[in-house]
Amino acid sequence: MNRINFITSTMVALAVLAGGCSDSSNKTVAPSTLSISGGTLPLAIAQHTYFHTVEASGGALNYEFELDHALMPPGITAEWDNNDLVIRGTGTQAGSYTVPVTVIDADKDEATTTLVINVAADNNIAGNWNLVITVTLATQDCTGEEGEYPAVPVTIIQNGSSLTVSGFLGDGSISLDGSIGGVNGNVVTIAGSFPEEGGTTTVTHTWSLISLTHMSGTEDWSWTDGQDSCPGSKSTVVLTR
């Protein structure tokens, strides 16, 4: 299967860098630098319970956290729990909230980050989206097909927590069913199979809502025509509108 050529011909398409160094003449390992995760957190839905953990690492335990709790979304709190910062509660007011956070370790070293917590009035994502898939791992007979594919339009039909997403490979007749939910009501899961280049592609998508106009996540996929196959292939997915 040549997924790139097929998708290009139809004008559609659809790591964590772990680094380290060591000194072979010195087997001791330097202590990790204190750091804290941050950025835009998964979307919170008003009147829906929310839970997210912001992790600190490196430095010397134990950690303390400093932030202005008045900047948190109404109904959502930040609590120190077992050296993590736990964001939880039920948001009551839609909006975007920016919260600077400092972590302080036992040696009084500090690291800072900024949390952006978006609260939406609901999790209705029905409508038209642009989907971009980047193949990060193509196995066996699909080896060499890694890379980003051009954006394709997809349409989401939503009925409560049930979803149908159509338009994969730029073909409106290709649709997958799934749901929106999860702990925070902000995770989309869809799955299914469709014909592609003389064989069958089977996919499972998991997307997180960053906002009601931005989702990102992963695609686990395989393809086979009965002779050739690409089991265990993976992609990243970004949707915008």
Image: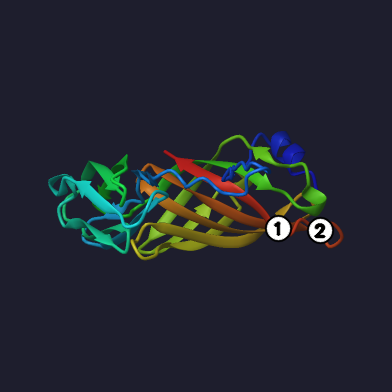
Q: Which residue does the image show at 41% across and 46% down from the upper left?
A: 127
Label 2 SS: loop
Q: Quadrant of the C terminus?
A: top left
The reply to whether the C-beta atoms of the residues labelled 2 and 1 are less than 8 Å apart is no
In this view, the residue farthest toward the left is 70
Vertical comparison of 151 with 57: above or below: above
Residue topped by disc 2: 225
Q: How many marks?
A: 2
Label 1 SS: strand
Q: Could you say which quadrant of the image residue 88 lies in? A: bottom left
Observer-nearest of 111 and 127: 111
Q: Which residue does the image show at 67% across and 42% down from the upper left?
A: 25
Observer-nearest of 115 and 224: 115
Whole-percent x and y of residue 153? Answer: 53, 40
Residue topped by disc 1: 222
Circle 1: residue type: Ser
Applied colour scheme:
rainbow
Whole-percent x and y of residue 3? Answer: 74, 44
